[in-house]
Amino acid sequence: MTDIKRMHVTARYSDTAVHNGTVYLAGQVATDDSQDITGQTREVLETIDRLLHEVGSDRSRILMAQVFLSDLADYAAMNAVWDSWVVAGHAPPRATVQAQLANPKWKIEVVVTAAVR
């Protein structure tokens, strides 16, 4: 039986859970919600990089990404940041949908599942 390792645990959720060679990230949002979609996307992707690094993974090992946008008009600007962040030849399967996010100032939330080295 493989143990589950959780990191950055709060009463409500953990930022990461690692089980059986896979890391599951909670939905990541920008802490500075005054930024436009470009700034929020950059911040979210930097947080994902940090969380993946903490468990011995990185963006080239992402198995699946789910992107939630509060406004699909931000799709092109989000993709411009995403495309420069994704590792060439390692673009993961991804779904992008419009969603009403918990905080109306959030423009993006990203959920990632990745392989751990």
Image (cartoon, rainbow, N blue to C red):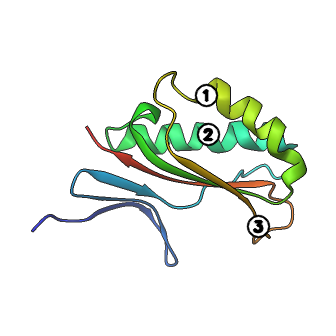
Tell me: 73 left or right of 58.
right
| Residue type at tag 2 | Leu
Residue shown at 81% from the left, 54% from the top: 107
| Residue type at tag 3 | Ala
Which is more N-terminal, label 3 or label 2? 2
Residue shown at 72% from the left, 41% from the top: 41
Disc 1 and disc 2 in contact, CB within 8 angstroms: yes
Q: Residue furthest left?
A: 1
> Which image quarter: residue 97?
bottom right
Count residues near mark 3 (Cα–Cα under 10 Å), then give few for <14, some for 14-19, many for 20+. Answer: some
Whole-percent x and y of residue 87?
51, 25
Residue 58 higher or lower than 5, as above or below: above
Residue shown at 86% from the left, 57% from the top: 71
| Residue type at tag 1 | Trp
Q: Identify the disc placed on residue 85.
A: 1
Disc 2 is placed on an element classified as helix
On the question of residue 35 being in view, the answer is no
